[in-house]
Image (spheres, helix red, strand yellow):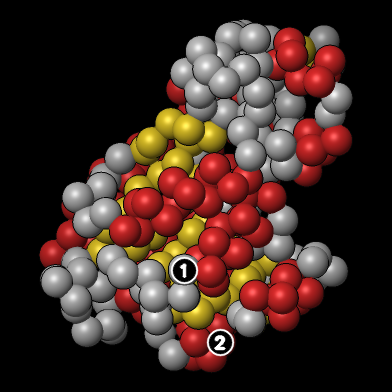
Amino acid sequence: MDIAGKSAVVVGGASGMGRATAVALARAGAHVAILDREGSDGKDLATEIGGIFHPADITDFDGVEEVLAAAVAELGGLHVAVNTAGGGKVQKTLGRNGPHDLDMYRQVIDLNLVGTFNLNRLQALHMSANDPVDDERGVIVNTSSLAAFEGQIGQVAYAAAKAGIAGSALVMARDLGPLGIRVLAIAPSLFSTGATAGFTDEQVAPLVKDAAFPKRMGRPEEYAKLALAIVDNPMLNGQCIRLDAGQRFAPR
């Protein structure tokens, strides 16, 4: 899909990989809406890139439906959706203080998996109204994690959620294929975002020692490059692409 002139929504677009993707989409000529939490840098970024900002909480499943609809109406349509919002908490299935807290497990699943799917089903609805170009109406890019494949100790909830996102890609692509909508997921390794952005070289080294090359954390711009490559190439569909420098997470 040619990005120039298309309408794109980046959920979690105020920081990290989402921010880099919003910037890259705008530079490629897309009209960009950023959805992120109230109080984030989303409004300032939207002004910077000539886009729009709508505050959203993806765990407010009804509320985000209204926010997305408002953003799409302001954009005049939806062709590209990139979903990066999420997060995790660490707790063992059974630890010194007893079994894993069930409410915490549900919160992590809701934030990452249910929140992403809720967005996907609504984004697909908006994309289905597009006039097809080369039989294509839209592209959805979700964010999984290497934890989906090699989750570390204490990541059982996060790994389950991210594995759900990875496992949904093919099924959703098959569901939406007749409408000309593609679905993919990106599974990043450790990226320099959020709390890790301030790590020193000494702190980073043991975290990336198992990477083949390069032995460093990923850069948000590298996620953005892959997201835009996915949008550009119509033969990419129904898979989860590892973005990991050949790294395989150890148990700890």
Count of number-bearing discs: 2
- In the image, taking residue 194 as reference, residue 134 lies left or right, namely left
Amino acid type, residue under disc 2 in the picture: Ala
Spot occupied by residue 248 in the image (x, y as percentages of width and height): 51, 14
- In the image, taking residue 186 as reference, residue 53 lies left or right, namely right
Categorize mark 1 by other alpha carbons within 10 Å: few (<14), some (14-19), many (20+).
some
Name the image quarter holding residue 52. Answer: bottom right
Front one among 214 and 46: 214
The residue drawn where x is 70% and y is 16% is 207
The residue drawn where x is 79% and y is 66% is 41
Front one among 22 and 58: 22
- In the image, taking residue 75 as reference, residue 94 lies left or right, namely right
Spot occupied by residue 164 in the image (x, y as percentages of width and height): 44, 38
Sequence-earlier tag: 2 or 1: 1
Name the image quarter holding residue 102. Answer: top right
Which numbered marker is on residue 28? 1
Amino acid type, residue under disc 1 in the picture: Ala
Residue that label 2 marks: 70
The residue drawn where x is 65% and y is 75% is 49
From this view, report whether residue 247 is shown above or below residue 228. Answer: above
